Image: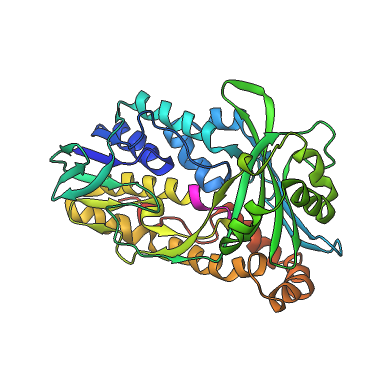
Amino acid sequence: MKIGVAGAGIGGLAAASLLAQDGHAVTVFDQFGAPRPVGSGLVMQPVGLEVLDRIGAGDALRRLGQPLHRMFGQEARTGRVVLDVAYGRGADRKGIGIHRAALFHLLYRAAEGAGARIAAAHRVTGRDGRNLLFETGRAGPFDLIVDACGAHSPLSPLRSRPLPYGAVWATVPWPADSALRVDRLSQRYRRADRMLGVLPVGAMPDQPTRRLAAIFYSLPVAGFGAWRATQFEAWQREAVTLWPDFAPFLAGVMGHGDFTFASYSQGQMAHPWDSGLAHIGDAAHRASPQLGQGANMALLDARALQLALRRARGDEALRLYAGARRWHVLAYQMLSAAFTPQYQSDSRALPVLRDHVLAPLSRIWPASRVLTRLVCGDLVPPMPALMVPR
């Protein structure tokens, strides 16, 4: 098939690699003059790592990334443990903290190695039947268009609900004097209206021995302007007061400009396809990053699309793709909607429920086992209809 992929993000490059491996003629169109990643750190969960292994990038990612065995969080003022989720004992049951730029590098190289063509400086503005439209012309016709343009895709009809809380992110060197463990995502909360976090993200391809961390601070979207207007040193003092162990990570941070703001939304397409068009990743579904599944969901979509095209062609393949992903996406959408307000909201009641009821219960079997499966990404089978042999 002749396939046009709109967007050279995680989902788009993964789809390009997998589909080109199967012999399809794939062209990836990206708006930037030189395609580049957007964002800071993320966690590759076991379900995402399995897809990366299929692509051929899994081993390289494990070398660059930082293995994570636990997600751990405490209430800042009381020290009460309110999040403690272990990945499990199996060698493959762990997360990998990775910088988006490192993951992008690996996926870009894999896509080119598989034979996909990357067409830079092609900003997608829409489609005309089986043709992709750009600011400067068009391309096609394609047997299939894959919409991987992300949350603001001009090809996607999804209208998601903005979430009231976002976060500012920065990437910093991992300090030699840090008291935090390098094998866990660590977080501190003030009720649910503030959250500080440190995510070990391993190294970059050009500096494999320099270990990094992604640090983040959660705040209301409406409060971002006020945060920017606050004297930076005053915010540093507030952050360190909430979490003294955060101080070494701020040593080289000079000001607000070192941080990037990210906002989030929630929504899912009931039918993530149209004739000749498949939506994947954030173009098809969006959620809070609280469960650490965003990039993994895009990888799973790409893999499901590959498997569906091995079984069928045309609209039948797209129906198969959508049906295979429906219940996994829906389950994680619902769980994200339930968990997020406990950690990012103005509620005074939910943090009390979280700290005194849900957190203690979460450390007792079988709840602890359920949470492990939840963060690993396979609480619900990711694509059951496609894993049954024909």
Q: Quadrant of residue 79?
A: bottom right
**Looking at the image, which is closer to me, 179 or 229?**
229
Is residue 334 visible in the rendered image? The answer is yes
Residue at x 80%, y 39% (from the top left corner): 248
221 shown above or below 356: above
Q: Quadrant of residue 29?
A: top left
Q: Residue 116, how many percent across, how many down?
A: 30, 29
Residue 294 inside the magenta-drawn segment = yes
Q: Is residue 129 left or right of residue 238?
A: left
Is residue 313 visible in the rendered image? The answer is no
Q: Is residue 333 left or right of residue 195?
A: left
Residue at x 56%, y 32% (from the top left corner): 61
Q: Which residues are magenta?
A: 291-295
Q: Residue 34, how many percent across, how many down?
A: 38, 28
Residue at x 37%, y 53% (from the top left corner): 152
State whether the magenta stretch is mostly helix, strand or loop: helix
Residue lying farthest bottom? Answer: 349
